[in-house]
Structures are given as structure tokens and as C-alpha cells.
Amino acid sequence: MRSLRQYSGAHRLEGTTESRTAITPATPTDHALTPSEVSAIRADFPSLQQEVNGHPLAYLDSGATSLKPRQVLDAEREFYERHNSAVHRGAHTLAALATEFFEDARATVARFIGAAEDEVVWTSNATEAINLVAYGISAASARGGADAVSLRAGDEIVVTEQEHHANLIPWQELASRTGATLRFIPVDDAGELMLDGLDETITERARVVAFTHVSNVLGSISPVDRIVARAREVGAITVLDACQSVPHMAVDVASLDVDFMAFSGHKMLAPTGIGVLYGRRELLNALPPFLTGGSMITTVTMERAEYLPAPQRFEAGTQRVSQAVALAAAIGYLEAIGMDRIAAHEAALGARLADGLAAIEGVRVLGPVAGAERVGLASVDVAGIHSHDVGQFLDDRGIAARVGHHCAQPLHRRLGVTSSTRASIYIYTTEEEVDRFIEAVADSRDFFGVRP
Amino acid sequence: MSSSELQSLYQEIILDHSRQPIGFGLVGNADGSSHQLNPTCGDEVTLEIAIDEHGLAHVHWEGHGCAISQASASLFSEMVGDGMSLDALDERIESFRTAMRSRGKIQPDEELLGDAAALGGVSRYIARVKCAMLAWVAAEDAIAQARA
């Protein structure tokens, strides 16, 4: 039987054998990945070894879900083959080992985002994480819970016009259940958050401010410090949607100073079914549980139950153990490359993508203008061609991109489009793939006959 | 350079209809009206069926969305032309649906469907069948209202 340390440690190293050989310690940490490093990384991803419609797959849909490296798949398989058992119960060896792996994965996530272990709650995905907070506040509000997590009629919840539906609808519902008012920070014609009126939007009545770290449509990075500073001034809880940031850049909750943060494993090399809610310890422990049942209690009578402290009070029922173990392996894989180098790689490709697209006549790049800061993600509106048709044309060339409203209808409506075509980049993306996307978008105008 | 499959999906006649649609523009006073939305991509079609004194259906529609969904609504309108009985429409909608669901195995009946048979290539693209069906589902719903 391998020990816990060997298990997680070995995977962390094995996970990056090939890329490590290409990365020497002398490489500056903010230096973009070299082509040979990217090519070593690509060899770890079985999905990339296939052709689609007669072309090598160009997977530019990592913003929706990332591909998975062998090392992550192996970690999950190995857990099932060797250590599978119920966690937090049972006295047998496998149960104890599985529990250690599960909690070690939590420790890995905590270290990765600069949190304490008891501030990391497992969820199925980021959507569930945000709902956990919203429903917890709802329950506290209905039953005279702690003031810090209770809302009353007249209180305000603030979101932004950039939000993914997952960070909008839970707050609409919470407002309607508590009588609170939902307000939002608007965006300008370029999609940028308008902070001039921040003090008027986030008023003394604001109790919750929920916003995205990186827009999943625009690729812009939110001014977290300004929004958090204003929320602190008025005593509002902050909730950060970090789905598009945590997989792509170094994120430290302590320096961001947010109260809650949600992200999903499947967008950062891990399987589906695992997500994370970070919560400030005192707030998590003030929040009533969202889902109730086994594994989250101390004493249960036929009339009532007492709950464990966080994080267990939010982890009712059988947990996502193999997925958590695989997420830890994914973090090991990312850390061996280096989050700053990943961010540099993606920023460089993102700029190449945005510049190339902006140069095409009839193509509007949504969000930051060319040259402005953006992550490795860009959405376009091609004049006269619906995004579904653009997407079909891209697919014919083996290019996987996202089309539609990307779960952000209000933002698209505000920008005057119903849908867009999005390319999103990750560690395995090459310049050549970005160029193929740009060329295909340009050629789609010929194919659909909209070029003058 | 694009594949022959893609060219068969987007035949010139389909692109023409998507650019210059037939029957576009609602008139109101319909005997049945249906709004259909494809939430995954935002395609929308609102289609009206009006029955004249001879029992013939006339169609008007509005919408926005991908070339397939809009061309399909236009081709449906062209097929109905100056009026068609509800029973004839039922038969055509059913025939079109069968072809669309066949994953490329059944070619649409050109004698029955006219130029709408050009949409046959869509049936191989499972994700796009819903686009092609949108106007026809709206018509089916509007016809049911007209009969009620």
C-alpha cells in the first residue's frame, strides 16, 4: 500500500514529467511557454491526438470545459482501482486512506488559492457553490440567523451586467425570497464595468456584492480591489465568480480579500462534478447548511439536528471523492508549469487572437479594445452571419469554439448582439491554432457571401 | 476551401432564402400564432396561420437566428405559397420531420416539399435539426390553434 504522501506527491511529479524536462529553473516565472514546452504539454492530452472532420482538432473551447491530461485521468482511475472507499466513516484501512486522500485534496486546493483548509467546501460545480451561499443567506434570513448573513426587505444585492447566469439568477431568486432589491453595476458600449457611479450602485443598503473576476464573454479582468473596497466600506459580503480566473492565473483569496469565491474543477483539467466554494471561516460558520443529511451533523434526535462546523456542514451525503483527488492532481499539473507562466502564455495568445480578429473587416471583437488587458479569450460578432453558422464553418475545419450567448444573455443584449462566437485558450493552445481560428472566421465571410 | 458536406448543408438556395426571406412580416388577425425559441442559440420564429374563406392556410412569420432556421421558415412560406389546406400542411410537416430525424438516411420528398427539400443536408448535423424544425414546429402549433 502506498502512503498518502507518495500517492499525491508522486502524481504531482509524474503529472508533469514531460513539461518539467522542458522547463529549467532559470526560466523567468512570468515568461510565456516556449513552443517545445507547449508541445510537451500537448502530448499529455489524448483528446488532442485526434482529427475532427479531417483536420487536427483545434480545441478553443476551454472556457466552457478544459481537456484532461492523462495524469489527471490516471489519478482518478488509480483512486478507484486501489483506494476506493467511503470517506469520514468506517474504521478499515481503505476508508482511512480514502479520507486522507480526500482531505489532502482539500489541503491542496486551500494552498493553491491561499485559504485555510476549513475554508474550502466541496461542491459539484461553481453554480452549486454560488447557490449554496444564496440559499444559506435565504435560510438565515427566514429564521433569524446571524446578522452578517441575513437579508431583510429594503436591503440590496449588487451584481454586474457582465455576469454569467450562474452568478445572476441565484441572486434574483434570493432577492425575490427575501424582499431585497437586486441592483447591478452597468457596462459601457465596450462591455467595461462602469465604476464612476460605484458609490451610488453599492449603497449603505448593499448586503451582498457578487461579481465575476474574469468575464466569460469578454475576457476582461474586473477591478476586484475597487469593488471590494467599496463593499467593505458599506459592510457588504463579497462573492467572486472565479471560474475564468482560477484555472488561468495565480489567484490568492487573502490578497483579493473577498468573502466567498466559487470555481469549477472541469475548467482546470479536472473531471466534471467537482467544484469549490471558498468562504471566510466566520461567515461559513454563520451560514446555515444548504443541503442536509448524513455526514454533516453532530447530534440528531427525531425532532432536530446539530450541525458540524464548516466545511463538513455543507457536505451532506456521499462526496465527490475521486473527483476531488483528480482536482488535486490537476492543480499539481498546473503548478508544475507555473500559474504565472500559464497566464503569460494565455495573455500573449489572447492578444494575438484579439488583434487578428479585430483586423478582419466586418468582425467586431466584444470587450476590451485591441491592446487592452485581456485573458486568452475573445468573442466576436461577424456582421451578417449568425454565430451558429460561424461555428458550423469552424467545425468543418476541426475547430471547436463556443457559439451562442455563453450563458450571458443580458451582457449580449447590452452590447447589441444576440450571440457571439468565442475562442478560449489554455495551456495546450498553440499560435498555429489561434491563427487557424482567425483565418477561418475571415473565410466564413466568403463562404456565407457577406464579404463586399 | 470547405468540405462538400458543409456545402450541401449550406446550399446556395438556403443562403438566398436566409438573406431575402419569403413571407417575412407579421400581419396580425391570424387564426393561430406560435412563437418558438431555441434557447441554446437564441433562434426565434413567430409564425402566423390565417385561414381564408376557402379553408386554405396562409403564412406570415418573423424571426431572427441562424441561416438554417431563417431559411427554413422562408422555404416553408414558399411551399405554402398562395394557400394550402391544413391537411396538406400536416402531411408536409410530418414528411419534413421524418427526413430531418433520419440522420441523412431519408432524403426530403421534393415533390411534396418543393425547394424546402434543399434542407435535407441538415439531418446529418444533429445539433442543427432543431434549427431547421423551428418554423415547422411553430406552424404545427399555429395550425392546432387554428383548428381549435
Image (cartoon, coloured by chain):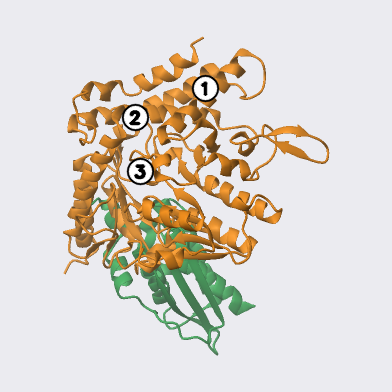
Element type at mark 2? helix
Please indicate whether residue B35 sits to the left or right of residue A180 in the image.
left
Q: Nearer the viewer, residue B113 or A142?
A: A142
Examine the image and state in which quarter residue A245 appears.
top left
Residue highlighted by disc 3: A62
Q: Which mark is residue A335?
A: 2
Q: The residue marked by circle 2 belongs to what chain?
A: A
Q: Are marks 1 and 3 on the same chain?
A: yes
Amino acid at dot 1:
Phe
Residue A341 point in image, percent of width and height: 26, 35
Is B110 displayed left or right of B13 in the figure?
right
Whether residue B109 is visible to the viewer of this picture, yes or no, is no
Q: 10 Å neighbourhood of mark 2: few (<14), some, or many (≥20)? A: some
Q: Residue at x 29, y 52 (%)?
A: B5
Which subunit holds the residue at mark 1?
A: A
From the viewer's side, name the closer residue of B143 and B47.
Answer: B47
Nearest the eye: A452 or B56: A452
Q: Residues within 10 Å of mark 3 (few under 14, many from 20)?
A: many
According to the picture, the residue beneath numbered tag 1 turns out to be A101
Residue drawn where x is 28% and y is 29% of the image: A41
Instruction: Give the quarter of the image for residue A153.
Output: bottom right
Q: Nearer the viewer, mark 3 or mark 2?
A: 2
SS at badge 1: helix
Q: Which numbered disc, 3 or 2, marks the residue that appears first in the sequence?
A: 3
Q: Nearer the viewer, residue A159 or A253?
A: A253
Q: Chain of mark 3?
A: A
Task: Tell me the colour chain A is drawn in.
Answer: orange
N-terminal of the two: label 1 or label 2? 1
Given the current orientation, which residue lies at the most extreme bottom position? B53
Give residue A154's position: percent from left, percent from top: 60, 67
Residue lying furthest right: A302
